Image: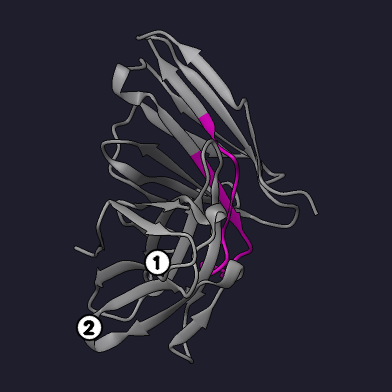
Amino acid sequence: AQSVTQLGSHVSVSEGALVLLRCNYSSSVPPYLFWYVQYPNQGLQLLLKYTTGATLVKGINGFEAEFKKSETSFHLTKPSAHMSDAAEYFCAVTLTGGYNKLIFGAGTRLAVHP
Amino acid sequence: KAGVTQTPRYLIKTRGQQVTLSCSPISGHRSVSWYQQTPGQGLQFLFEYFSETQRNKGNFPGRFSGRQFSNSRSEMNVSTLELGDSALYLCASSLEGRRDEQFFGPGTRLTVL
């Protein structure tokens, strides 16, 4: 079965430090890959996505992610954390033939401290 | 352009009751998907509707049902509520063929007492 694994349910960084949130997927075919962010009491906002083409994708708020097929990974990074980045982050995939069904990882809660 | 709207935003029910949640997609979007978010199970896919037809379904009991109207608005219904149904219910909409671009609503927070 297809699955998404996010390593680390909680990540804490200092303001200005590198943010690295890890995501691995299992799929027999390359899926579409996504990172979503969720702020308290809100829905999900798309940060970035990989479908085809360039494996390094840039998203909103300075985030980027690299699709590595050989490692089945799609880690999210941001060079310098800001206090406003504190939120929960979800990695997700959709599969060909699965219509719009998103399969989510368990989420990583990012804390940013001064 | 208005985003995805969900009503109500908050709901409190008691065990055994039933509930109906509503989702209005972005104008022009004909695909609507529903998800349940709980601390224990995370985000789980409930079902997807397109052109008034359910075309994909997650692994939930028959107490969970949905429908879509000709204007693409969707409702989901949960009958005989259980404590474990307490969750944030999210819907997402997209244009046909655009599984790469789905927009989520703010969710309905359901509490079952």
Where is residue B27? Give x, y as percent: 75, 53
Chain letter of mark 1 equals A
Q: Secondary structure at mark 1?
A: strand
For the point 31% across and 56% down, which residue is it?
Answer: A105
The outermost residue toward the front is A114
Q: Is residue B106 magenta?
A: yes
A46, A1: nearer the viewer: A46
The N terminus of chain B: image quadrant: bottom right
Where is residue B74? Give x, y as percent: 60, 39
Above or below, B24 against A106 in this view is above
The C terminus of chain B: image quadrant: top left
Above or below, A84 against B77 in this view is below
**Amino acid type of the residue that numbered disc 1 sits on in the rendered structure:** Thr
Where is residue A24? Give x, y as percent: 26, 70
Q: Secondary structure at mark 2?
A: helix
A74 with respect to A65 (left or right): left
For the point 28% across and 43% down, which residue is it?
Answer: B59
The magenta stretch is: B90-108
* Res B18 quadrant in image: top left
**Is any atom of residue B55 visible in this view?**
no
Colour convention: one colour
For the point 24% across and 65% down, which residue is it?
Answer: A2
Report crowding for label 1: few under 14, some 14 to 19, many 20 or more residues within 10 A (C-alpha).
Answer: many
Which residue has dot 2 on it? A71
**Amino acid type of the residue that numbered disc 2 sits on in the rendered structure:** Glu
Which residue has dot 1 on it? A94
For the point 48% across and 27% down, which residue is it?
Answer: B77
Q: Is residue B82 magenta?
A: no
B1 with respect to B23 (left or right): right
